[in-house]
Amino acid sequence: MAGATFLSSVQPPALRGVAASSSVSSPAQRHAHMLVCCKGNVEGFETAAHEERLRFRRRDFIGGCVGTTIGLEMIDGSTRFTGVATAADLIERRQRSEFQSSTKDTLYTAIKANPELVPSLLTLALNDAITYDKATKTGGANGSIRLEISRPENSGFSAALDLLVEAKKEIDSNSKGGPISFADLIAFASQSALKRSFLDAAIAKCGGNEEKGRTLYTAYGSNGQWGLFDRTFGRTDAQEPDPEGRVPVWSTASVQEMKDRFIAVGLGPRQLAVMSAFLGPDQAATEERLIADPDCRPWVEKYQRSRETVSRTDYEVDLITTLTKLSSLGQKINYEAYTYPKQKIDLGKLKL
């Protein structure tokens, strides 16, 4: 067989014939068989007589063992791999990644110029997502809040929505794969707003020195926690408002009402406590109310302590995790969104 001939040409003489063994059928069996061969041969090679005749060292032999095992696994899985990750898939992933990166840049610039809107952008994202109803599978992070901005729970957020509308114009004008959905726009604006608040906290810990604050956030920040959030890209917009009455007015709602709303979407007191920055313009006032509740108190205290540390790990990781779950409520992600056909090349016109 071609595969066996290829392997025979690259593996040490002591291993030839292993790859073609007809008694070893599955990848796991071949791996186990290989380890047995390696062990047996190494033990034999450790005698003085064999050491003199060997042209390669033990670590080279063991390396060959591992390399051959990996090679066998790759050959065995090659047909499965080509069925999943075709060239077209990789092109679409790159297109989406580039569009997402461009979107983040635009939002970062807009939010940096309007830092006072960070709390409103966070609550806007929360109110858009938390309309989800598990029983009817309706609502969620679907961009419907743009149609609900006149409701009492969304009072005061018009300026934040206006900022996103303007950012959307710029994003869409540079998009090759169609306009961005409001659902994605709102979700990624909340990410940018959070990153801005995290960076500002790091700068504050450095006495207001921006350069030192950026260095601190780079060294201890939470950027590595956004992987799952970034993959949830391709939400579809609702074309009508979600039903009324699903979102409390956070600044006046009782703690029990807030807990009930979080529980209704699959969250709880822990997530309510970590989302305190989303629940009105005054985070300290919100936490003062939450800390009086026995279910919320331990979590509020935990995150208050975490924010005092250099890394703020517990607070930032739990906040990112909660936002990721909220931003995926009610969504079936279109993983081909924002992709576009590549320009075909006429090979006949190429000058070689």
Image (spheres, rainbow, N blue to C red):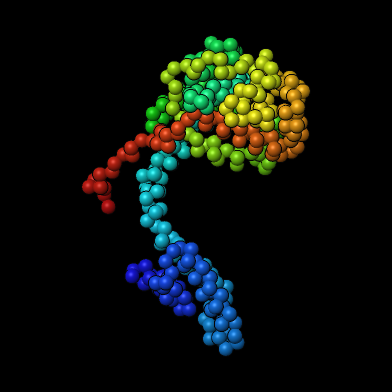
Q: Quadrant of residue 281?
A: top right
With 235 as the anchor, is 223 left or right in this view? right
Task: Residue at 37%, 47% (x, y): give it.
Answer: 87
With 151 as the anchor, is 339 left or right in this view? left
With 305 as the anchor, is 210 left or right in this view? left
With 1 as the anchor, is 49 left or right in this view? right
Task: Residue at 45%, 32% (x, y): give it.
Answer: 332
Task: Name the residue nearer the viewer: 141 or 341.
Answer: 141
Residue 282, given in percent of the width and then of the height, sits at 70, 19
Residue 175 appears in the picture as rendered: yes
Task: Residue at 57%, 73% (x, y): give it.
Answer: 59
Residue 113 appears in the picture as rendered: no
In this rendering, the answer to whether 9 lies above or below 242 is below
Task: Residue at 33%, 37% (x, y): give it.
Answer: 341
Task: Name the residue nearer the viewer: 300 or 304.
Answer: 300
Q: Quadrant of residue 285?
A: top right
Q: Quadrant of residue 215?
A: top right
From this viewpoint, which residue is outermost toward the bottom? Answer: 49
Residue 29, given in percent of the width and then of the height, sits at 47, 66
